[in-house]
Amino acid sequence: MRQQIAAANWKMNCTLQQAEELLNKLATVSDFNSVNRIVIVAVPAPYLLLAKQKLAHQTNMFVAAQNCFTKKSGAYTGEISAEMLQSMDINYVLIGHSERREYFNENNTMLAEKVNLALEYEVTPIFCCGESLSIREAGNQNEFVAQQLKDSLFQLSAAQIVKVVIAYEPIWAIGTGKTASSAQAQEMHQHIRKALEIQYGSNIADAVSVLYGGSVKGNNAVEIFSQPDVDGGLVGGASLVAEEFVAIMNALK
Ligand code: PEP
């Protein structure tokens, strides 16, 4: 049974005080039904240990980093290694968010290196993929996303790919208030699962959680998450408001 996941991506938001306040609210959530459902909170790097500490007693809440580097260690000022994350017992890392691809020129080859390193250090990659508006308008979204998966994930063995979470995030829906319709989300998630099946077989394809990201809110999460191939969401803006994010958590199947 695939895990249903509500993942928060705080991006570069929150002062330390605001982060503490938000984490305190998540730490006091007590009515979240956790059977096969988990919550992951991707906080800015300076708050990783604070988040671990605050959420320590929440057995189904995990902390994620928003990025890690393509190299193991060395003279790469400002970067964070997968090994550092492992040493802090951080269990997840976002890889290939569209903002990293756009503003930091991360390409599919670099992202394959990051995925490999994260897995080597036992940090679960949440691999983000998704097309721009122009690609969608040209009707090439399926080929585009399939290529992202092929270039950055399909070097993995079957034993490795089941340790990856995939997040489909159409770029035109991120932070725009414009959500993909539930039918559009399901269509792409089914396409992603089919690509996994062709590469690894149906048992593996059925075991990988595929999240939807792009303007998920408390009031649209139930509909999107109800789609058979949508296993939860990666949530930006709405994850900064505790009540909204809790509503999204509770919308998981
Ligand atoms: C994201 O940052 O991954 C995201 C989906 O953002 P938003 O929910 O704000 O669209």
Image (tube, rainbow, N blue to C red):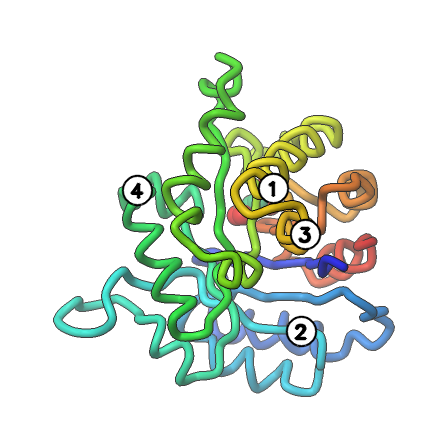
Q: What's the distance in space between the residues labelled 3 and 4, CA to CA? A: 29 Å
Q: Residue at x 40, y 76 (%)?
A: 85
Relative image position of residue 164 (x, y in whole percent)? 53, 58
Q: Earlier in the sequence, mark 2 or mark 1?
A: 2
What residue would you read off at disc 4?
107
When the figure is inspected, residue 191 is found, relative to residue 161, above or below; the finding is above
**Contact? badges 4 and 1 (CB < 8 Å):** no
Q: Is residue 72 left or right of residue 223?
A: left
Q: Earlier in the sequence, mark 4 or mark 2?
A: 2
**Residue 197 got which mark?**
1
Q: Residue furthest left?
A: 75
The amino acid at mark 3 is: Asn
- Asked which quadrant contains residue 19, the reply is bottom right
- Labels 4, 1: front one: 1
Q: Earlier in the sequence, mark 2 or mark 3?
A: 2
The amino acid at mark 1 is: Glu
Q: What's the distance in space between the residues labelled 2 and 1, CA to CA? A: 29 Å
What residue would you read off at disc 2?
61
Q: Earlier in the sequence, mark 1 or mark 3?
A: 1
Q: Residue at x 66, y 46 (%)?
A: 202
User: Total label count?
Assistant: 4
Q: Earlier in the sequence, mark 4 or mark 1?
A: 4
Q: What's the distance in space between the residues labelled 4 and 1, CA to CA? A: 24 Å
